[in-house]
Amino acid sequence: MIERRDPLPSPPLSSPIGRVVATEQKPATPHQFHFWTANETSIGIGAIVRVEGLGAGDSGRVVYGVVTDGFAYSDLATPLHDVVGAQGDPAKAAASPTVRQEIRLWTAAVLRQTPEEPLQPVPLGQVHVATDVDVAQALRMDAYLGGAQPTAIPVGLYTSGGLEAPVYVDADFLLGPEAAHLNISGVSGLATKTSAVEFLLSSIFQHFPPHKGRVAAVCFNVKGPDLCFLDRPGTLDDEDRRRYQRLGVAPEPFQQVRYFAPFKADGVNLNTLRTHPDLVGEVEPLVWGLREVLDYAEVLLNRDDIDAKADAFIDFLADRVVDKEFEDGFGGAHRVVTFADLERLFRSIFDGLELASRSGDSWRTHHIATMRKVRNRLANISTRCKGLVTDDGPSNDLPWGRFADRTVYVVDVANVDPLGQDLVFARVVSQLRERLERRDLGVEAVVVFVDELNKYAPADGPETYVKKMLLDISERGRYLGLVLFGAEQFRSQVHRRVVGNAGTAVFGRMDADELATPGYQVLSPATKIKLATLPIGELMVRHPHFTQPIFVRFPRPAVLRGRDGVERYPPAADLPFEDAVARQLLKLDRRVRPNQVKDLIADRREEDVRRALAHTRQTRPQDALAHFKKQLGGRVAAVPAAARESVPPLNAISDEPY
Amino acid sequence: MTLRGSWVEAVVAAGAVPASHVPDASLGRGDVEEFTGADPVEAGELRVEPLSDARPLAPAAVCFLDGIEQWRVVGYGGITPIVRAHVAAAVRRRGPDRRLRTVAEATEDVAITRLDRLPAGVRRALEAAGVRVLEVPAEEAGQPARAVAAARVEVQKTRTALERRLGEAGLRALAADEWLVVDGVLSDSAALSEHTRALGVVKSHGAQYFEGAELERALTLPDGHRTSVFRPRARGARRDIYSWYVRLWPWEGNDLLYGLLRLEARAHPETIALASPIAAWMRAERAPVATPDRRWDRLLYPIHGVETYLRARAPSDLTSHPASRIPNPGSRFPRTAS
């Protein structure tokens, strides 16, 4: 006879918290199992558990799983019985002397089994809360956490029932070459997507394995001041600092950040929200000329423009004309460097064709209509992208070939015309790709962060140059070290091949409508609900090493958030032309006196001033003012036109009609 | 150490013919059907008392005691059945959080047969197996059907003894403001029938205490009423006890016994004073209803909880399985086709 007299003791911390159950209707399989827990349990959706086999043949088998669904029910056969018991009064139902027997039944997806072979159904064993070590085992992080060359990069903290364990992703699978790219989606306004990327970049910079070389990031700021203050410390609370410490990441802003922004239409004021006097000096202008634009003309010209003839003519210009000594065939010699030079060439050709009175309408096999169309479109570019594209004068670009390790390059195109954004994006990414292929960028890996990915690589819509380029990066970038970190509100609206090639996927709070799309069918209803209600700072992560998505918390980024940045460093109002020029020269040479500059440029044509300024900026001479003055050239005094000597008529006009 | 149930294999190996028969009666307890009579205590004759003004007794904590029995004919030595039985009882306590927790339980596995009717080898194997063997009376052992019926009686005795022992132990552990509610009669135990806070809840009405108008009054008791307290006449070893009926649910449209409980408490004037508060308490115990049990109209949910607990822990091979009568491949079931 077995007798027991004492109440069931409450389990100590090391005790099992549940037990695997299997029925014919809900059997345990090699990939899924069910277990029950006490009603008061720390287990929740996303919790990682460890199952230890106890039965015959199961001894030593350990299974790790993540909770994907939960059920609670009582022994109530039908709701009607509750009504009967309470005699139709809900208040009485709550006052019943005994609480019905309830169950907390959980469904878990298998993360890992040890031993891995033979793969068998989960044993009907005891369920334990996972420890730090268990989490590492369950997520297969042990493969890259240790060893001679660890490649672990902290991504967040797995938290459940008081347990907190760091979760790492594998650099080989985040930044190549095994897999690469990261896609993050979530509703706007919850400060999650950008914050997560900022934290992750910081983590990458601090944990990128030395044997993998140097790494940099290029971030396109496409809205507001989001990425304008990455070098400024943000506000962290104690909890954030504790999380940073737990993750082994220093809570500090990025040490090396370089900002690039095009000018506004006036050509002297920068088109960015980082224009506070204390900060604007660190923003470098992004100015491109004809050569930079012509290579990416396809980006700027719509499908109707790019017929074979126009394409051939653009190629002709790029190969035979630009930056070369060129004779137009009408006696004119040209060296086309700027848009202004190109315009002069076009004018010369059209005049030449007209004066030559030729019967044909072609010039060097190109029809005049084609040439007129290309001229039109190219002229239009410098108008629409004024500030980014200069009609004349030198360009100012990212430091190609001199990219520095652990440096963020922010390209602020938030206020640039969409056409200009496309151009910037296409050219920067193409340059990155070309230089990474040639291994002369200066770093071995570059993370390109693009927000609003649904705009650049939409699931439907025309095949644009940018979209093709993003597809190309997604599919081949990992071999080059060109890694795309894309963010969007609706993952379903981004091209499947772009999101599909992202080895790591991160999900913030999702819209219920979005979760109803086919891309989320693999998630359990409970996981979807959790995703729909995720708090700020919590994410779901999918990574090639994790067989199931894992929920993690991450600390707030240690950088100043965009909104806070514009409050602390309000953007300055646009300066008058003279002041803006003086400030730029002052930035190049602290000896420059604003009044000297103003006197120098008084009554000068603005385009001449801009050209001289651009040249000075590019040359970076020791004596900036002297160089600027030289480039500006001597002042040519206006000479009044001599009055023409009039010749009186031979006869006064008479009334005589004949 | 002999594992539970392994003695069955031992006796089969010794020559007993394996069997698999779960009698219907093994899943529940039989009712005692008899008329004993009763003496009115609260009034000159059995009266009907309304409970509308009664304030329910509300103990801070209540312990509920119930037991189960399960048995199966597992083999035959000759024509003498060998029965394997499992009896269990538990006390589950309901505290201020209104949840039931098991505070005491006891189980016992026994073999029931007639040893001197078994082949010598089987008998030796059974005696060596380490299981407690109960014997049916010699006069019942000749006929298998009567032997099985006698085995059932032995099972019930074992179960009631286990319940009584657990109940009496439970009384000793009872706190000052705690009650013990027993599923069944109190009068089997002197300790239980004399305790101030022990209550027997009887839901089977095989035993009748009244005749004529009083019986009709008792069996047609309206919903929300109780009868006056009476003293069942003692029979056998049963102790002096007070009892009264209470109707939990309207019987009209169902059955006379629908929702009818008989309560037992110690034979003391205080019990008369507590009759209405206790009856009102039992009515409060109607929720939650003990569905899907067919006896839910009379089965208190906490008692149902004790039963559920015990059945969940009982050996699974003692309950009837839908396919249990299908011969196993090794049986000597005659082949009907080649």
Image: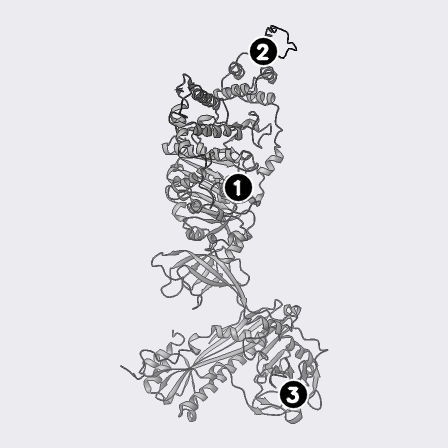
Crowd around label 3: few <14 · some 14–19 · many ≥20 (10 Å): many
Q: Nearer the viewer, residue A444 or A211?
A: A444
Circle 2 is placed at which residue position? A638
Question: In the orientation shown, which residue stands out farthest toward the right?
Answer: B53
Q: Which mark is residue B218?
A: 3
User: In the shown orientation, is residue A36 left or right of residue B284?
Assistant: left
Residue type, mark 3 in image: Ala
**From the image, which quarter does the C terminus of chain A lie in?**
top right
At x 41%, y 75%, the residue is B4
Residue A40 falls in which quadrant of the image?
bottom right
On the image, the x and y values in percent for residue A161 come to 53, 55
> Which chain does tag 1 point to?
A
User: In the shown orientation, is residue A139 left or right of residue B283?
Assistant: left
Give the CA distance from mark 2 to mark 1: 56 Å
Residue type, mark 1 in image: Thr
Q: Which of pointers 3 and 2 indicates the residue nearer the eye?
A: 2
Circle 1 is placed at which residue position? A194
Residue A312 falls in which quadrant of the image?
top left
